[in-house]
Amino acid sequence: MRGKLMFITGLAAGFVLGSRAGREKYEEIRANAKKVWEHPSVQEAAGVAQAQANKLYSESKDKLQSSKLGEKLHVTSDDSTTETLASTNKTGTTY
C-alpha cells in the first residue's frame, strides 16, 4: 500500500510540474528531437540499420521458403485461400 501511495504522489507531482512547464517546454523538446533526428550521422546510421534489417529479412525469407516447413506452409496457405474464396457467398460472408 505504501508503494502505491508513493507512486500516486510521484505521479501527481510530475503532473503539476509538467503542467507548469507547459507547451513551451514541450515544443523545445520536440524541436531538439527533430534536430537530432535530421542530423546527417543519425540518418546515416538509420540507413545502415534499415539496410541490414532488409538483408536479414530477405535471407530469412529465402531460407524459410526453401525449407520443408516453408514448402508445407506455402501449400497450406494456397489451399486455405482457395477454400475461403469458394465458401464466400455474394454478400461477402464466409461459412
Image (tube, rainbow, N blue to C red):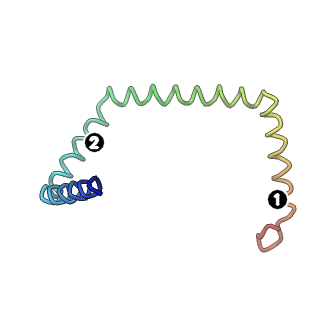
20 sits left or right of 42 in the view: left
Residue occupying the far left of the picture: 20
Identify the residue at horizontal 12%, vertical 59% (top origin): 20
87 sits left or right of 6 in the view: right
> Does residue 58 lie above or below 13 as drawn?
above
> Does residue 87 lie above or below 37 as drawn?
below
Q: Amino acid at mark 2?
A: Lys
Identify the residue at horizontal 83%, vertical 37% (top origin): 72
Q: Position of residue 56 (x, y in %)?
A: 59, 26
In the picture of the structure, the residue carrying the numbered disc 2 is: 34
> Does residue 32 lie above or below 42 as drawn?
below
The image quadrant where one finds the C terminus is bottom right
Mark 2 is surrounded, within 10 Å at the Cα level, by few (under 14), some (14 to 19) or many (20 or more) other residues, namely: few
How many labels sit on residues?
2
Identify the residue at horizontal 79%, vertical 40% (top origin): 73
| Residue 84: mark in rendering | 1
Mark 2 or mark 1, which is nearer the start of the sequence? 2
Residue occupying the far bottom of the picture: 91
76 sits left or right of 30 in the view: right
Question: Tags 1 and 2 in contact by the CB under 8 Å rule?
Answer: no
